[in-house]
Amino acid sequence: MGRRSECAALDQLIAAVRTGESRVLVVHGAPGVGKSALLEYLEDLATGLRALRAVGVESEMELPFATLHQLCVPLLDRVIALPAPQRDALETVFGMRTGTAPQPFLVGLAVLSLFSDASESGPVVCVIDDAQWMDQASAQVLGFVARRLLAESVALVFATRHRAHQLLGLPELEVSGLTRADALALLESATHVRLDSHIRDRVVAEAAGNPLALLELPRERTVTQLAGGYGLLHSETLPTRIEQSFLHRIAALPEQSRLLLLIAAAEPVGDPALVWGAADRLGIAPATALDEGTERLVSFDIRVTFRHPLVRSAVYRAAEDAERRAVHLALAEVTDPGVDPDRRAWHLAAAAAEPDEAVAAELERSADRAQARGGMAAAAAFLQRSVLLTVDAERRAERAVAAADASVRAGDLDAARHFLDIAELDAHSEYLGARAHLVRGRIAHAAGFNNEAPPILLAAARRLEPFDMALARETYLLAWGAAAWGAADADSLVASSTAIRKLPVPEGDPRSIDLVLEACALLVTEGLGTAITTLRRAMDALVELPVPEVLRWGWAACGLSPAVWSEQVMIETYTRAAEVVRAAGILTELPIYLASLGAATSLIGDFATAAEIVAESEGLATATGVPLAPYTTLILTAMQGREDEAAPLIATTIEQTAAAGQLTGVTTAHWAAAVLYNGLARYAEALAAAQASTRITQLVVSVWVLPELIEAAVRVHDDEAAREALDRLVDVAEAADTEWSHGILARCRALLADEAADELYREAIRRLSNTLMRPELARAHLLYGEWLRRQSRRVDARGQLRTAYDMFVSIGMAAFAERARRELLAGGEKVRKRTIEPSPDELTPQERQIALLVGAGLSNPEVGARLFLSPRTVEWHLRKIFTKLSITSRRQLRDALPHSE
């Protein structure tokens, strides 16, 4: 009734899947609006197809991969056929084998392969109801899978009250209330009594088109109450009123029936054996408990399912505390500790009426297992509950520190602060207090780059020195990183660097962190010339840095990579670190790595990849509530010359980050403005922005902005400012001694040279041609062409300017392209303004990546494993690649990609 458009959308989805396409849909709307009914319609449409179903359960949200396990159980016999790394990952997270926590992306790839394999024998329809209650690990994996389904005959449909961040951006179908006419018809069918028109209109208005409300609200009212409007509630929200209707029906049931419903509500899996086992322990007999009224509320079949999620919540909330504890204890007793120790521990915790050390210890072990499976949010939940059940104050403080640390890593900063307060109140040892101090600093840092975190972390490092020098050294690095990359706090940066240099020299060969610490301190106290050798050794160590160390302090160290002026090192370091942190699910730190990777990707001219990174980073920042300046968007839009977007973003970022103490955001925004206005040939504005950027002590940006300052100053005839900036650049660029640094230096020297300008421009082009820095190379051609035209060497100028123009258009740098075009016009050449849009025959970045890997001899499964795609999706992409390149076989790819080496 009244769902024609929604049903049509589902009709189209199933039709597409039947023809071999993949489809993803997020069905969302208020409780009771009809999402579950639409899923039933979908499953009816899918007759003859393989259907997989899972239901999110509120009480199971802390158990990692619980929803995913429900969905994949019918396919577990196919796991053996997966590639070994994928098979091991899936078996580990499902508890089928022991092992270290696998990367969630590897789990996602395993599920993608599993679905792809299942679809070989026919289309597969996956339905996840109550997706708002999926555990975080399942949501992350299924979101990953949803974004990579392409050429498989698989439908993935979520029904949810509200969209989790993992599902944002996926195709969606909003289910709203019924129209007035349909609502009136449904109400009339449910009441079987003629209502006064005013009362009828009031019921329809208050139900807001919600079908379940229209069916349930009148159900417990007498004919006279309905006819006259008595008994209709006002104060509660609509879900509460619907739930109240269920409560009236539950209250009328016999005691044993109510208790049976409570067991079913408390048992999240819906396992009839567990429900009846617990019922038997509580003396409940099926013959007496299965009342006629229970059949309208719950169904006992292969699974125990409630008619509606609000029935489950109504049953559970209506029970007395003692009843709930008794039920959870019974469920714990019938849950096999060898098969499902974590769910058993959770039931025991819910059954505890007072602190219980045995249960607290069991929860602590569950937290360890959750972390081993990659479930950081679950680990935090177990530890939080463990704290509340601990009697001994010192032990409670230890667990509270662990709970706070896990909470901040899972992105729940409010919970982290709460448990840290408990730890600091109960801690009596200086060591435990120092560890709590460290977590306090991590919270301050996770809340956004600001000037609060560096001194807290520095103080924590000093407190830790007498007890744990290794941890103290890591904490000094965190303090240094917070000052260098976030707050741009000169005082804290110098203080951290000075403290690091006073640390005793470790025995034996230097470890990665030892090299990084030495490089950090030397860079600040002595300069790049003294630090460069140690810095390069540190960068070599970072590439192979073990995962645990990346997770502990990698973000602070990886920020050093731009200081060596090697784009390959920078991209490689940031890419690996982002993959490691993303895999570990540490969402509060991932945006930091993505911001760095996105900016680096923009600098080499890969704007499409940078835009993808922006989308992921913004989604994460929104989901975690961690404010972070839009570093990638700033530099990307500036390089693209999109003034309408870049200028207001720059202004807003400067205002907001200055207020928050995120001075790196301020200096980055000014740098972006300098790039933007140089591209637009508004040099006075570019000079002012560049000078503002250099006034803030930021180890990388305040140096990278110098070429912008020099170019703008020369154009406005401020040679003094240009030469002063060049002197600073010479010290850094010569110390770095890379093709990138020497190329930039030669280009800037040429701007201030007379007779040597020609040779310096040629050197800049030669050196930058040996790098990935295509935008910088294009700008060298532009500046050389501008100089040649002013030297009346028009023919030579046209060649350089044409090269620059073509490169800018290819990269997507519209403002610089227009600047080159104007120079060409001024030189007498006719130039048609080209729209910066990719050709339909041009390979996308992903297609090019696939083509390169296949051309190098990798199989489809190997390419899929590398790029997190299914083999069928790789094959689908290859067909498009072959068409675009006008080739017919894999062997032809190498010749068709002459620039792939």
Image: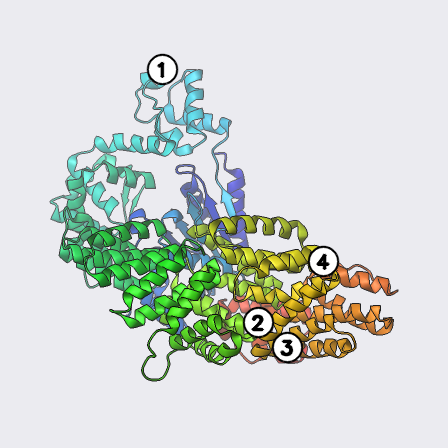
Q: Is residue 542 above or below residue 718?
A: below
- At label 1, counting other C-alpha atoms closer than 10 Å, the crowd grade (few under 14, some 14-19, many 20 or more) is some
Q: Nearer the viewer, mark 1 or mark 4?
A: 4
CA gap between label 2 and label 1 equals: 70 Å
Amino acid at circle 1: Gly
Residue 140: image location, x then y, percent: 41, 57
CA gap between label 1 and label 3 equals: 87 Å
- Tell me what residue is drawn at x 27 percent, y 64 percent: 369
CA gap between label 3 and label 2 equals: 33 Å
Would residue 897 be seen by someone viewing this image from the given angle? no
Along the viewing direction, whichever of 140 and 3 lies nearer the viewer: 140
Task: Give the structural element (helix, strand or loop) at label 1.
Answer: helix
Whether label 1 touches label 4, CB < 8 Å? no
- Tell me what residue is drawn at x 40 percent, y 51 percent: 128
Residue 900: image location, x then y, percent: 63, 77
Amino acid at circle 3: His
Amino acid at circle 4: Tyr
Q: Which mark is residue 228?
A: 1
- Tell me what residue is drawn at x 46 percent, y 71 percent: 525
Report the label total: 4
Sequence-wise first label, 1 or 4? 1
Q: Which mark is residue 742?
A: 3
Q: Which mark is residue 850?
A: 2
